[in-house]
Image (tube, rainbow, N blue to C red):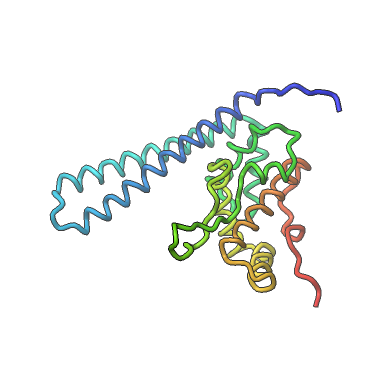
Amino acid sequence: MPFEPWQCPDGSKLALRTASRRLEALVKQQTQAKNHLHAFLRNRFSPAFVIEDIELTLAQLGHRIEAMQTHILSLIEQNDELQTIFNRLITVKGIGSKSAVALMGELLVLPKDMTAKQWVAMAGPDPRQHQSGTSVDKPARISKVGNKYLRKALYMPALSAARTEEHVRGYYQHLIEDRHLKKIQAVCAVMRKLLHAIHGMLSNQTDFDAARFYSAPAE
């Protein structure tokens, strides 16, 4: 196989990744501020000015998040390729505009010759059992190995699709009921399969085909 030098992704895709990660950071700050507000409201000794300061922070973050989302959607609308991919991704029930932006930001900067298996390996959506000394095993959770941004971008769409999309829900139930997987294992399996589906959609320039995702075997 002839050597093909690495080619830098075009600027719009790199800009999208930067913007989507910044949006993720702002949303994380918003979540932390909400948790702080909840904790301080439960503490009767919290000064009113502290509560007001957190509420001001939340209001500012809300405006900044809204502005960032507007800028990102404008960036996508100005690029025909990005707009086409965005429209294609949101054909997946469970992938909304926020998730589509996050997925695009991480996936579109990858080398075009990467396989679906390589995507999955990079994302690392696998459950890991955690132990602490001689204590009882803790509940499994998703591994922190791999691209955390991509993994997080897949998690909520997988959960949503497993609840609302007939074929994805069928696959999830098959894993739980027939293969006796734990819920976190089944969610990770849905994440991996969803990533395979997205790879096929982008490679073949097709919309999501739920029937190809999973069909229950005939009884």
Residue 143 percent coordinates (x, y): 55, 50
Q: Residue 102, relative to residue 18: is it above or below?
A: below
Relative to 62, 1 lies left or right: right
Kindly identify the residue that appears in the image at 64 percent across and 32 percent down. 109
Q: Residue 145, relative to residue 82: is it above or below?
A: below
Residue 121 percent coordinates (x, y): 66, 44
Residue that sits furthest to the bottom in the current view: 219
Q: Nearer the viewer, residue 87 or 163?
A: 163
Q: Nearer the viewer, residue 155 or 127?
A: 127
Q: Nearer the viewer, residue 165 or 67?
A: 165
Based on the displayed image, in which of its 4 quarters is residue 189 positioned? bottom right
Residue 195 percent coordinates (x, y): 67, 49
Kindly identify the residue that appears in the image at 66 percent across and 67 percent down. 175
Residue 9 percent coordinates (x, y): 65, 26
Based on the displayed image, in which of its 4 quarters is residue 2 positioned? top right
Quarter in which the N terminus is drawn: top right
Relative to 93, 51 lies left or right: left
Q: Residue 216, relative to residue 110: is it above or below?
A: below
Quarter in which the C terminus is drawn: bottom right
Residue that sits furthest to the front in the current view: 134
Relative to 190, 25 lies left or right: left
Kindly identify the residue that appears in the image at 49 percent across and 33 percent down. 71
